[in-house]
């Protein structure tokens, strides 16, 4: 987030914490001028501030911020596409843009449907021209950059989505089997740049197993 937006988050939180009644805080939250600031970064700052208040012994305000963060997170729904689109701006090559847009769309569909092939496979079929080495490169470059900068909770959510997508494209019956497997391998490998046996043992083990299987399927 840039400094101007960060300052706006701080101002909003200070206003909310200075409210003397629930009705007063509700008016701030309902103000349409503030809606554009209610995003994943704001939720993260609410949670961080809540932790600080808790350490200071101010459990009342800490709990207030936790409840607010939870409510906004639920209202926002899936956040990964917002994060993907933001970070894909770093991929400046014009030829990468259609792949970036497709990647954002397919990862959102994967997350929202929980990996339902009836949702994801029609999307892959409609974009079969993008299932090639460029998609593999965009996935690898974008995810590497994302994992280097993202908060742990966001990174884990993306890792799960990429892992599920990799499993789906690995088994996708159309297009080039060899390319589909290479895209899956790129997904598994890039997840392991973030995940370790210590910070996510269950997912790490699952990805290691899937990666080993994908290596065996290489043509």
Image: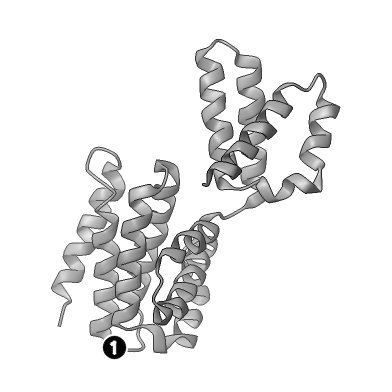
92 relative to 75 in the view: left or right: left
Which residue position holds label 1?
176
Could you tell me which residue is drawn at 35 percent across and 68 percent down?
139
How many marks do you count on the picture? Answer: 1
Could you tell me which residue is drawn at 69 percent across and 34 percent down?
12
Q: How is the image coloured?
A: one colour
Give whichever of 134, 123 is nearer the camera.
134
Q: Quadrant of the C terminus?
A: bottom left
64 relative to 112 in the view: left or right: right
Check the image and report above or below for 30 versus 85.
above
Give whichever of 210, 139 is nearer the camera.
139
**Callout 1 secondary element:** loop
Could you tell me which residue is drawn at 26 percent across and 56 percent down?
207
The image position of residue 77, as x and y in percent, is 62, 53
Check the image and report above or below for 40 versus 12.
below
Displayed quadrant of residue 90: bottom left
The image position of residue 86, as x and y in percent, is 50, 60
The image position of residue 65, as x and y in percent, is 63, 28
Give whichever of 34, 50 is nearer the camera.
34
Could you tell me which residue is drawn at 65 percent across and 39 percent down?
8
Give whichever of 118, 8 is nearer the camera.
8
Badge 1 crowding class, 10 Å Cα cut-off, few under 14, some 14 to 19, many 20 or more, is few
The outermost residue toward the front is 4
169 relative to 193 in the view: left or right: right
Displayed quadrant of residue 92: bottom left
């Amino acid at each position: 987030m840039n400094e101007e937006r960060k300052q706006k988050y701080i101002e909003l939180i200070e206003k909310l914490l200075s409210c003397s009644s629930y009705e007063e805080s509700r008016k701030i939250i309902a103000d349409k001028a503030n809606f554009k600031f209610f995003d994943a970064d704001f939720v993260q700052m609410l949670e961080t501030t809540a932790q600080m208040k808790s350490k200071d012994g101010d459990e009342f305000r800490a709990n207030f911020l936790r409840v607010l963060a939870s409510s906004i997170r639920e209202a926002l729904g899936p956040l990964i596409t917002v994060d993907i689109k933001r970070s894909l701006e770093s991929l400046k090559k014009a030829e990468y843009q259609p792949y970036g847009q497709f990647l954002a769309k397919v990862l959102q569909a994967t997350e929202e449907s929980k990996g339902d092939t009836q949702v994801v496979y029609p999307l892959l079929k409609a974009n079969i021209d993008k299932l090639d080495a460029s998609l593999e490169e965009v996935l690898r470059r974008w995810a590497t950059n994302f994992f280097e900068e993202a908060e742990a909770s966001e990174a884990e959510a993306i890792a799960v989505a990429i892992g599920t997508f990799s499993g789906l494209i690995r088994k996708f019956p159309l297009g080039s089997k060899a390319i589909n497997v290479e895209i899956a391998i790129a997904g598994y490998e890039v997840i392991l740049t973030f995940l370790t046996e210590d910070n996510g043992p269950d997912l790490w083990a699952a990805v290691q197993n899937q990666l080993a299987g994908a290596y065996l399927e290489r043509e």
